[in-house]
Image (tube, helix red, strand yellow):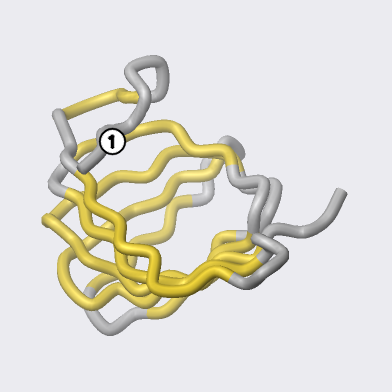
Amino acid sequence: MSRPAADRLLAGSPVQHAWNAYSDAGEQFHAGYWSSTRGVWRVRYTECELCVLTAGRVELVSDSGVRVSFGAGDAFVVPAGYSGTWSVIEDCTKIYAIFIPRT
């Protein structure tokens, strides 16, 4: 169990669970499951993440104001460099695949 860092939390008191099912030997690729209760927090992605929402509803709003919403069954990518907010509108669960580019 975890929660967003206090300096990133904007609303609610979300509780999050992650189960990492796979990591490659180089620690550059990870895949697993993640869930969260409702809330809003700031995010800054240094990795690329494929998300497949299996339950619930989320909304992402970029720092430039682009707003996108996703529900159960939707798949989307959050690219490295993305900065904005992540809102859990309905408690959600996702399957994730994360790629961390080498710098």
**Residue 78 position by quadrant:** bottom right
Q: Is residue 52 left or right of residue 50?
A: left
Residue 4, given in percent of the width and then of the height, sits at 33, 32
Q: Secondary structure at mark 1?
A: strand
- Residue located at (35% from left, 33% from top): 41
Taking the view exactly as shown, the residue that stands out farthest to the front is: 25
Residue 88, given in percent of the width and then of the height, sits at 23, 49
- Residue located at (23% from left, 77% from top): 54
Residue 98, given in percent of the width and then of the height, sits at 56, 65
Q: Is residue 75 left or right of residue 77?
A: left
**Near-viewer residue (84 or 93):** 93
Label 1 neighbour load within 10 Å: few <14, some 14-19, many 20+:
many
Residue 21, given in percent of the width and then of the height, sits at 39, 73
User: How many numbered markers are drawn?
Assistant: 1
Seen in the picture, residue 65 relative to 47 is either above or below; the reply is: above
- Residue located at (33% from left, 53% from top): 59
**Residue 19 position by quadrant:** bottom left
Taking the view exactly as shown, the residue that stands out farthest to the top is: 7
Taking the view exactly as shown, the residue that stands out farthest to the bottom is: 73
Q: Is residue 48 left or right of residue 9?
A: right
**Near-viewer residue (68 or 21):** 21
- Which quadrant is home to the N terminus? top left
**Residue 63 position by quadrant:** top right
Amino acid type at circle 1 is: Val
- Residue located at (22% from left, 46% from top): 16
Give the residue at mark 1: 40
Q: Is residue 54 left or right of residue 27?
A: left
